[in-house]
Image (cartoon, grey):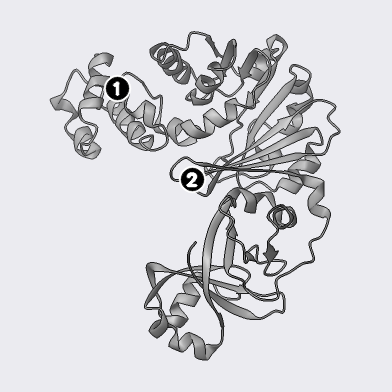
Amino acid sequence: MNLDRTYNFANEHLNDNTDKLLLNKKSFPDVDMPVAVTQIHARRAIKDKLPKWYTNNELRYPSKLSTEQCSSEITAEYKATLFIGETLCDLTGGLGVDCIAFSLLARQVNYYERYPEYCQAAKHNFSVLGRYNITVHNSDFRKVINEINADTLYIDPARRGNNLQRLFSLSDYEPNILEIKEELLSRCKRLIVKISPMADISAVCREIPEISEIHIVSVKNECKEILLVVEKGNTNAIRIITINFDSNNNVQQNEFIRTDEYTPFTEYATATMEYLYEPNASIMKSGAFNQLARQYNINPLSRNSHLYTSDQHITEFPGRVFHVIKTHIFTSKWAKGAKQLFPKANITVRNFPLSVAELRKSTKIAEGGDIYLFATTTTENQKVIIECKKG
């Protein structure tokens, strides 16, 4: 079968029903239909994630899984800013999106990948994209570790179990980061490790004391990546950098020193003021709630609500800002009459005994509209509903 014809066919039939294509594969004897369908599924999967790749008909994809597991263009570009020196080794190459981003800054990049079909696709794609400073190695890096040396090493270990369940503990990753950490640190100036966005940051800091920085990256307020910067012998306090790329690709960036969070914040709000502040997903993951209050001079509604209030309109706040209309005391009587007040509203629950679904069921409030309702508990342990509009 003609591979060029197969890839052209995939591009020509990008929007077709792939089940029908497979059923009718005998009608296209010069097309490797399973390969073509893989390309179609992969292209569809990257439309929003890798928009520049999506528009390039010459690129090839070894599997749909490779597109699901790869970084997005925007997170790869951010990750590349963490590189130091002149040379980099990507120890878990995959689709090669990160390698390409690194290659724009590094003099030389080495791509390591144990699956030959991934390496073949990577060689082709790197050539198409003009990234001639990337060398492809079809090898499990652990088998050639003695040959590896670079200013920066990057590793994105597999975080799926045998049944494709998500894994959050570093010791469960493939490879086990904790087992190879010392060896990797002996072969670079900086080690960058991508871990699950669901990982327990406190546990990770205990397991890898050499961490110098933790970068928490969100896109459109969804936490996508946690990146550990690890440097041999580091004893400095850990810097936490939170990044959120909003829907317009504007950047919300904040930086905290992890140990500063241990200093408590005691100036809790006694009432909801004119504005309500909801931190973005990266701030929420960082746990830097006391530092956020100090940095922006805003008052938490309670210790566990992670909502803040102020009479000042802080446009640069890293999250959503709302103008408070009214604060309602939540009672069963209020819930029964809520639908008359709010036929529809956007509901968020923080530190509240009911879930969003339970609150909608008890109030009969439909979803949508311009009103935002925050159900939370104040520092006086009072259950309230804060009525807001976007600030």
Front-most of residues 133 and 24: 133
1 or 2: mark nearer the eye: 2
Note whether residue 44 is visible.
Answer: yes
Location of mark 2 (residue) = 246
Residue at 47% across / 25% down in the picture? 95
Note whether residue 1 is visible.
Answer: no
Location of mark 1 (residue) = 57
Per the rendering, the mark at residue 119 is none
Spatial CA span between label 1 and label 2:
28 Å
- Is 81 rendered above or below residue 296? above
Check disc 2: other Cα within 10 Å, few if <14, some if 14-19, many if 20+: some
Q: Is residue 93 left or right of residue 261?
A: left
Residue at 59% across / 30% down in the picture? 79
- Is 355 rendered above or below residue 66? below
Front-most of residues 34 and 168: 168
Residue at 69% across / 34% down in the picture? 228
Q: Residue furthest left?
A: 27
